[in-house]
Amino acid sequence: MTKDELIAKQQVEIEDGEKAAYELIGQRDYWEARATRLAEDVGAALGFDVGEHSSNNCPIECAIDQLYWMRTQEMTVSLAPPAENMGLKNE
């Protein structure tokens, strides 16, 4: 293989690698946007704000944290004794 053929082959390999990288980045961005939309929709349906995506906030993580917190609150409430057992009256 001549020097020029080797250079041409390497250039094709570089271009193929760049194309694959751009496709992967595009797929990542697409699914990140879909996940963010899902987080926003879950927040809206359940009454909490997941915030804007920034270096300090990830709406997806915020939605997960809020759902976990809500589930923890449900479990705490369901484990609480009935009010009449605590000397309180339900009115």
Image (spheres, helix red, strand yellow):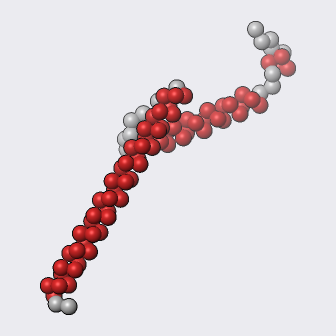
Q: How many marks?
A: 0
Q: Nearer the viewer, residue 42 or 71?
A: 42
Residue found at x 41% / y 48%? 31
Please provide percent x and percent y for residue 83.
80, 18
Residue 8 vertical position relative to residue 70 in the rendered view, above or below: below
Q: Is residue 78 visible?
A: yes
Give x and y (percent) for residue 56. Answer: 40, 42
Q: Is residue 21 left or right of residue 68?
A: left
Q: Is residue 48 visible?
A: no
Horizontal relation, residue 64 to residue 86: left or right = left
Residue at the spot 22% in from the left edge and 74% down from the top edge? 12
Give the quadrant of the N terminus: bottom left
The quadrant where residue 66 appears? top right
Image location of residue 47, percent across then percent down: 52, 26
Query: For this view, does 36 lie left or right of residue 21?
Result: right
Note whether 3 is above or below 10 in the view shown: below
